[in-house]
Amino acid sequence: MDLLHKVLDQEAHLSPSELSGLYEYDIFTLGDVANALRTKLYGKKVFFNNNRHINPSNICADVCKFCAFSASRKNPNPYSMSIDEILSQAHTAYNNGAKELHIVSSHNPNYTYEWYFELFREVKKALPQVHLKALTAAEVDYLDRISNKGYQKVLEDMLEAGVDSMPGGGAEIFDEGVRKYICRGKVSSKRWLEIHSYWHTLGKMSNATMLFGHIESREHRIDHMLRLRDTQSKNGKAERKEGGFNAFIPLLYQRQNNFLKVQAFPSGQEVLKTISIARILLHNIPHIKAYWATLGLNMAIVAQDFGADDMDGTIQHESIQSAAGAKSKSGLSKQELISQIKDAGFRAIERDSLYNELVEC
Ligand code: V47
C-alpha cells in the first residue's frame, strides 16, 4: 500500500519522518484527497464569521524572534489600552456587526492578574450577546507565572469571568529545538497542550494554530499536527461541541520588522500541500481554517479547494500579522469576503464562533 492510502486507512502508526513523505506527492493528488474529505463534510460551503480582533497592549515581557507586534527597537511605539478604551472598541465592533471579539495581548507586566478578569466581566456585562474568544495558552501560562495560581485556576477564572472560547495562538511550532530558537521562555509545547486539554475538560472549545514557513522542517510541521491529533483523541469531543479543538489554523510566517532571519520562504505549492496534509491527518479536528490575513485573500480562497473549509472572518482590525507585513490591518468587508467565496464557486456561510451556521449569504 502506498503512503497516502496507509494514512487514509488510519491503521498504521507512522512517524513524523515517514509522514513527511506526504509532501512528495504533487499538489493535485494531495488536493484531490483533501478536497474529497472536506466535500464529504461540508459540500461547497465555506465558513466565515463577523469578528473583531482587539489587542490591548504591545508591551511584552517575552521576546519571540518572529514577532513584529511587540514594542521593540524595530517597532518602538509601546501602547497599553485601558478597560474603558477596550470597551469603546468593543462597542464600535458590535455596532459594525461583530458577533465575536478575539482579545489577545502581549505579556504586559503592567497589567495585573485581576485586570484581565475585570476586563472580561466588563465586556460580557456590556455585550452579553457577543462571543468572547480570549487569551492564548501563552497568556494563560504567563498569568499562572505572575500569580502562582496554577493554569487550572486561571482557566477556571476565565470561565467564571465569561470567556466563551480560547483562540489557538502561542502554539508556534511544538518541536522543542525550534521553539527554543524562535521563542525561548514562552509557554512550553507540553504546557500549551495541557492548558488546552484542561479547557476542554471544562467543556469548552478552542482552536490550534501552527506558525510555519520560517526555519521549521516538513517533519516539524507533521509532528506539530500529530501532537494536536493525539491531544484531541485523548479528550476532545469536538463533534459534539463539548470541549475540544474546533479548528486548526496554519499561520504563514510574515517576514517584515522582526528578528528572525529566514533565508527561504515556502512556495504557494508548499503552502497548499501543508493545508491538504492538515486535512488528511487531522481527521478528528473538524475545521481547517485558511486564515486570509497570513495567506492573503487569493491563497486563502484557493485553499478551499485544497482541504480548508473556513476563511476566519471580517477581522475589522488586526495588529499582530499586519505589523509583520500582512495586509490585514483594517480587516475586510463582509461583502468582499462573500463575493470572493462565491466567485470561487462556493457557498458563503456566515457562522458563529462555534461553527453553528447562521445564514447563507
Ligand atoms: O501565536 C506572530 C502569530 C499568533 C507572526 O484562534 C505571526 O481563531 C505570522 O493565534 N507571521 C496570534 N504569524 C494570532 C492567532 C490567531 C489568528 C487568527 C485566528 C485565531 C483563532 C488565532 O500570531 C501568534 C503567532 O503564532 N504571529 N508573529 C508573523 N510574523
Image (cartoon, rainbow, N blue to C red):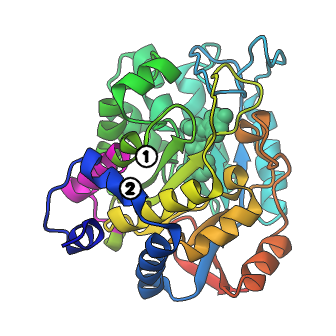
Q: Nearer the viewer, residue 96 or 126?
A: 96
In percent of the image, x 29 and y 38: which residue is there?
194
In percent of the image, x 76 and y 38: which residue is there?
319
Left or right of 315? Residue 238 is left
Q: Earlier in the sequence, mark 2 or mark 1?
A: 1
Quickly name the residue at label 2.
204
Q: Which region of the structure is painted magenta? A: 223-238
Residue type for callout 1? Leu
Q: Is residue 83 above or below residue 5?
A: above
Left or right of 262? Residue 307 is left
Q: Secondary structure at mark 2?
A: loop
Res 88 visible: yes
Quadrant holding the C terminus: bottom right
| Residue 153 x, y percent position in the rendering | 34, 32
Main SS category, magenta section: helix
| Residue 121 x, y percent position in the rendering | 59, 42
| Residue 185 x, y percent position in the rendering | 45, 15
Q: Under 8 Å from ligand 1: the CB of mark 2?
A: no
Left or right of 37? Residue 269 is right
Q: CA distance from mark 2 to mark 1?
A: 9 Å
Residue type for callout 2? Lys
Residue 159's disc number: 1
Q: Is residue 134 above or below residue 100?
A: above
Looking at the rendered image, the disc whose residue lies closer to the viewer, 2 or 1, is 2
User: Quadrant for ligand 1?
Assistant: top right
- Tell me whether circle 2 and circle 1 mark residues in contact (CB < 8 Å): yes
In percent of the image, x 44 and y 70: which residue is there?
30
Residue 235 included in the magenta stretch of the image: yes
Which of the 4 image quadrants contains residue 115?
top right
Residue 172 included in the magenta stretch of the image: no
Res 120 visible: no
| Residue 279 x, y percent position in the rendering | 42, 67
